[in-house]
Amino acid sequence: MKAKEKKKITAENKAEIKEEKPDVGIIELTVEPNELDLSISQLAGVGAVTAKKLEEFGVTSLLDICVRGSKELSEITGVAKVKTNVWVRSAQNIMIENNMIRDPDKPVLELLEHQEQLPIISTKSKLDGLLRGGVRPESLYEVYGEFGSGKTQFCLTLAAEVISNNGKIIWIDCEDTFRPRRLAEIIIARGYATDLEDSKKFLENITYYYCPNTEQMMAKVNSLSDIMTKDKPKLVVLDGAIGQFREEYLGRGTLAERQNQIAHLMTHLKNISYYFNTVVLFTNQVQSDPSIMFGDPVKPIGGHIVGHAPTYRIYFKKSGRKHIARMVDSPEDPVADMQFDLTEKGISDIEE
């Protein structure tokens, strides 16, 4: 009875809540996530024992149910996949009814309008021409390239633009290369702060995690729902994660296990971008293919599992003192190159 009353109240207040919220070009929430009941215990078949098993693996809300997917839920609980499929569908329906996520069955014209109104994070450089203005929510971006090609600087540049507008960021550092001072330098050089002390008010908008191994990294990715529900970050950066799998899973005997773990990670990242309406960006290392006699022998690590996961795939490379970005894979853009420079502003235009 209580559940029915709550749903009725939500429906009655729906129009009123929508009128109060300004049109900012993103999904309007009928109910804030912290006001809606997101507990997993409301799902049919999730009793105290099953809920405890799920919570031990970081599954504490309906959002976690959707991000993990039915197969992983079945592995965690031992419940048949047919039943975990129902859990995922039920969780999705609750969030769709409350406008927490985009309806996957939107008509094409409504989907077009929705995508056109998504907010863009810009680099404030000509590199945006390669990205149709910048990076967008509900998308997974991969940036790969050799060391020193500008991958982390690209992430820092986007981060500077987000936090300068009081947006929130989650940064998962897998290579111990994140330097708050460098980010402060970019903020100052772009005119958002006058000095290091002034820039600290922006740095507070970053939630930072250092994960030195794959176990910690996967655990952190799996437990992001609470902080993301609370802070609603505009950008999630995973810097250097794929390289950790190459370092820890050595030899052909571990290849299957490594690729399975990477597949789990890719699925989670894609789901996070969709269910939390945010930009997810991960950097990737490269290797040389000795079988390529002509052309560029550099290719990203992770194989086809990584290659098919991102919405957009961008290749950064060095050519002498020049830096080049290439759109390798995109659902809407041709393969194209754009030159850029790395300065105190981060990603910058080349001075002519």
Image (cartoon, helix red, strand yellow):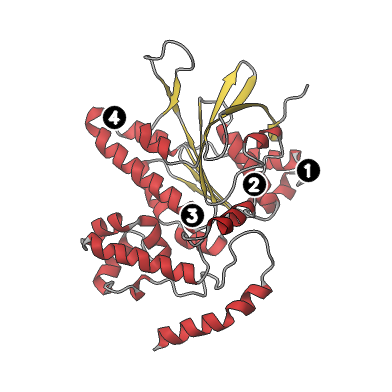
Tag 3 secondary structure: helix
Q: Position of residue 68 (x, y in %)?
A: 36, 56
Q: Which residue is mark 1?
A: 191
Q: First in sequence: mark 4 or mark 2?
A: 2
Q: Inspect the image, locate mark 3, and give the three-letter code of the amino acid beneath it.
A: Tyr
Q: In whole angstroms, how far apart are the C-alphas of marks 4 and 3?
A: 33 Å
Select label 3 or label 1 by which is in front: 3
Q: Which residue is mark 2?
A: 121
The residue located at (55%, 53%) in the rendering is 278
- The residue pinned by badge 3 equals 274
Residue occupying the point 45% across, 17% down:
297
Q: Which residue is mark 4?
A: 250
From the viewer's side, name the closer residue of 103 and 188: 103
Circles 2 and 1, Cβ within 8 Å, touching? The answer is no
**What is the residue that sits farthest to the bottom in this orientation?**
1
Q: Is residue 88 above or below residue 292?
A: below
Task: First in sequence, mark 2 or 1: give its number.
Answer: 2
Foreground pick, 83 / 203: 83
Residue 322 pos. (x, y %)? 64, 20
Residue 218 drawn above or below residue 43? above
Instruction: Tell me the kind of residue under disc 1.
Output: Gly
